[in-house]
Image: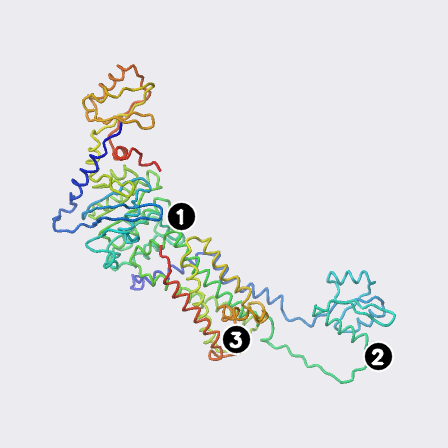
Amino acid sequence: MSSLQHSSLFQLTLTRFRLFLREPEAIFWIFIFPILLAVGLGIAFRNRPADILQVAATTPQLTQVLTADKGLTASTMDEPTGTHALATGGILLLAIKTAEGVEYKYDDTNPDARTARLLADRAIQTGAGRRDAVQADNQLIHETGARYIDFVVPGLLGMNLMSSAIWGLGFAIVEARQKKLLKRLVASPMPRWQYLSSFLLSRLVMLVIEVGAFLSFARFVFGVPFRGSVLELAFLCVLTSLSFSALGLLVASRARTMEAASGLMNLVMLPMWILSGVFFSASRFPAIIQPVVRALPLTAAIDALRGNMLQGLSLGQMAIPVGILLAWLIVPFAVSLRIFRWR
Amino acid sequence: MAWPASIYIGTMAENWIHSRPNAEGKTAQAEAPSLLLRGLRKAYSDVVAVNGLDLEVMRGECFGLLGPNGAGKTTTIEICEGLTDPDAGTVELLGLNWKTGANELRQRIGIQLQETQFPDKMTVEETLHLFRSFFKQGIPVEESIKTAQLEEKRSSRVGGLSGGQKQRLAMACALVGDPELLFLDEPTTGLDPQARRHLWDLVDELKRAGRTIILTTHYMDEAERLCDRVAIMDHGKIIALGTPQQLIGSVGGEHIVEFALNGDLTVAPLLAIAGVQSHRVDAGLHQLSVSHLHTAVPAIFAALADQNLDLSEFRTHSASLEDVFVGLTGRNLRDE
């Protein structure tokens, strides 16, 4: 037997790997699920040609004029039918022929309906003989890095780093405590710091696989850009994972049952799923809660990941989110070491 | 009519606390006891679990803490194992204590806890390698597998083991560090009779190897079978201490005669019979403590016939630790 096999830190870390790899569900949630989610979102938000908007008019003449616009497809309906179609989302706008001219019926809080209003009016006015006062030409760009998939990949990466660290640490520790394994380990000469370190070590190795798989997929299937330093991106992933591991440790430091731990973990993660800008920008939340939103570790992590990947910012330019992540690493770790229940 | 309890408590503590069975023929006087407890107390919010406990266990001894559930056995053994801090009292193991010698002690003792569940997805061998890695010195994993007779299960996952096999794995984990002192907390609770006997053989083997063993149990047959000395605990105190034979002898007779009657018994004529020590009634059964069965039983039959009473049940058994406990507390060990 080699001396490595005699090392308790090695054996403890090996144990973590064995237990993880023998849990097929965990492998699904950590490796497969984020990729499936990215695929789903990539399909849902793929770049399509500009939408053709559905509209209707009350007379065949109007319908013909509207159909002439490339951005619109029109049908003829009487007013009650058209109103019903508006209400059920079948059409975005109904053009009603009146004695004076034309009246548009649409929902002005719907951006698509507002666009339909502009297109329909332009088509009708042009059809009636209006000429543009200024000559205008279009130059179309479809830039990578500005698409939704580019925006959401760093968000999913941050969310995945959070879930795998908190679930991975929290559940394993509380399960060991509930099954009295923790007590048995403490009754042996095992150094306690090695037990906790084994989680971090195994987490770091798993991180390479899990982040590597996810980002390669994003790069080669969706062409998501990597504008910043890859080394700094790796550092950010490690920092994020360690911060959430510290939080997972804190969540698991007292809980005696899986139920209690599970509730606590959801309590910790739910606000971040909602507020931290995984799927849409966190700046959309009202100014009054922005300080809270900004202080969340997931917001900081995602901001930093997006800064690196999409904007090519260096660590120095992202001192604030990196500082927030460091604080979330140090404080929960220190607290949990003090209050950890070893039996 | 109760049995006099005082005779057991007073005499046991004085007579047997300093007796020193000696497994390896070493000079007992030169050695510190493997375990020394003085004035141990531990109270939880609702109950006093250990209430002033003194105990010495000698090197090479197999010592049993016997008592019903809730008697304070587990609290006592966990204080000894350094897992629970006592409210008062001193604990000394192998001449060391938990305040200053914890790291060395952890290396030198072996522990099997009552309800540890090892991870289901690890194999027997992997679990033992893990535990072996915690100890600076110890026996090869191979040897612990052999001792616990888990050779055929070495590559099986823990989740697939039977209750008895899991318990033997727990013993193997306690053994990999080649401990001088071994703590076993209710090692056979919940096992079927065959698995229990199997585990007893394992403990026998460890005894033969000269290890000091301290075990708790609420099975008196287990204590009788395995232990050199036994302390009977109740309500956080030791109420009797000695070898199983001494304790059983203290009941007053080596045999117990039990019978049931359809009628009321006048006790005095029975107690007058030579060899009959005492009488009590337990759940409608009359129990006599008897020393000379072959002369006493015919006399008992005659005395019952004199009172025109019909026997509906009659049996005798050798007195056991159960009878000692019943005699001391008026309760059965298995009452919960």
Label 3 environment density (alpha carbons within 10 Å; few <14, some 14–19, many ≥20): many
Quadrant holding the N terminus of chain A: bottom left
Distance in Å between CA atoms under marks 2 and 1: 85 Å
Mark 2 and mark 1 on one chain: no
Closer to the camera, B220 or B280?
Answer: B280
**Residue on which disc 3 sits:** A309
In this picture, residue A328 sits left or right of residue B53: right
- Above or below for B128 versus B311: below
Closer to the observer: label 3 or label 1? 3
- Above or below for A144 versus B141: below
Quadrant holding the C terminus of chain A: bottom left
Closer to the observer: label 2 or label 1? 2
Residue B144: % across, % down = 28, 51
Residue A311: name its quadrant.
bottom right
Please state which amino acid type lies under the numbered disc 2: Gly
**Residue on which disc 1 sits:** B160
Label 2 environment density (alpha carbons within 10 Å; few <14, some 14–19, many ≥20): few
Residue A129 numbered mark, or none: 2
Q: Chain of mark 3?
A: A
Please state which amino acid type lies under the numbered disc 1: Gly
Q: Do tag 2 and tag 1 residues touch (Cβ < 8 Å)?
A: no
- Above or below for B225 versus A342: above
Residue B107: name its quadrant.
bottom left
In this picture, residue A257 sits left or right of residue B111: right
Closer to the camera, B74 or B179?
Answer: B74
